[in-house]
Image: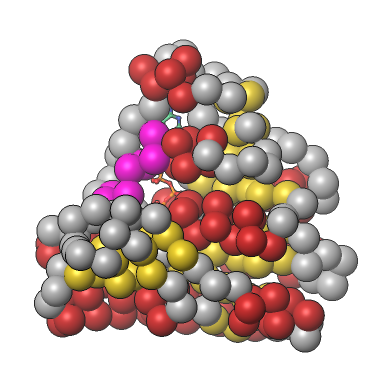
Amino acid sequence: MIVLKLGGSVITEKDRPETLDGEALERAADAIAALEGREDLVVVHGGGSFGHHNASEHGVTTTAGTRDASAALDVHGAMKTLNQFVLGRLLERDVEAVPVHPFSAGHRDGEGDLHLPTGQVETMLAEGFVPVLHGDMIAHAGAGATVVSGDELVAALARSLEADRVGLCSTVPGVLDDEDAVIDRIDDFDTVAAVLGASDATDVTGGMAGKVRTLLELEAEASIFGLASLASFLDGENPGTTID
Ligand SMILES: Nc1ncnc2c1ncn2[C@@H]1O[C@H](COP(=O)(O)OP(=O)(O)OP(=O)(O)O)[C@@H](O)[C@H]1O
Ligand SMILES: C=C(C)CCOP(=O)(O)O
């Protein structure tokens, strides 16, 4: 069973609000369609130019919340729009993709910890569907609603579903060192902290630094790689950077 995140930076033009990178999304959908039926797959996608700009305008992050429903729905709506594009490209390729909207499915407790029940995802998988989740807003005890990143959802799903493989397809071929070479393996935050930055584009969830931090907390290994390596990841290889 594979949990795969399609980074928003891959499937959208992240620096142009609400702009899809149609060609990249089609390539990602082709790779997923080639896997169809061989293994259980849960897809999560990030926001890219959908969601991050809206969240930034409303001043919401993974810790700063809002109690303004219109603001929450603005971010949620942008993410649902992108989710429709992702589902559409998968359905065109006969992948039985169905949506799961985290805002309606989970919450954060007062400590900010994410709780994501997965009974619906497990039933979808058992019935042959490919669940497609996305970064979203989420009710947060004591803070209203905050942003939940696709990376956090990947980690929660991988834990609950005991995923065999976890992959994050991003716009970079892996985590890069100070000479832009792909770092093969990361097992400690401090040793790479100096090269880990935010995203180049508007991003409220922490860019590469947030991604590595979240994945290091996960017991299972995870791979971060670029679109050119998505097919090889789905074929069982470990391209890019392995976080363990
Ligand atoms: N050391 C690093 N190696 C690689 N990328 C880095 C590094 N430091 C910062 N980055 C930035 O992190 C970005 C990837 O993080 P980002 O959160 O944008 O990815 P994503 O998950 O694909 O997108 P989204 O968060 O929209 O879903 C890269 O585009 C790059 O700008
Ligand atoms: C900005 C929102 C709503 C979700 C972002 O998810 P991410 O792109 O995985 O960080």
Q: Is residue 192 visible?
A: yes
| Image coloring type | secondary structure
Residue 180 in percent (x, y) is at 48, 20
Nearer-the-camera pick, 27 or 44: 44
Nearer-the-camera pick, 114 or 12: 114
Q: Is residue 110 left or right of residue 163?
A: left
Task: Indicate yes or no whether the magenta region holds residue 205.
Answer: yes
Image: 58 above or below 91: above
Residue 147 in percent (x, y) is at 30, 62
Task: Indicate yes or no whether the magenta region holds residue 113.
Answer: no
Chain part drawn in magenta = 203-210
Q: Residue at x 63, y 55 (%)?
A: 159
**Quadrant into which the C terminus falls:** top right
Q: Residue at x 34, y 62 (%)?
A: 109
Q: Quadrant of residue 241?
A: top right
Labels in figure, total: 0
Nearer-the-camera pick, 176 or 100: 100
Residue 108 in percent (x, y) is at 36, 63
Q: Residue at x 50, y 68 (%)?
A: 116
Seen from this angle, which residue lies furthest front?
Answer: 110
Q: Residue at x 13, y 58 (%)?
A: 59
Residue 200 in percent (x, y) is at 30, 39
Q: Quadrant of residue 197?
A: top left
Q: Is residue 56 visible?
A: no
**Quadrant into which the N terminus falls:** bottom right
Q: Is residue 57 left or right of residue 21?
A: left
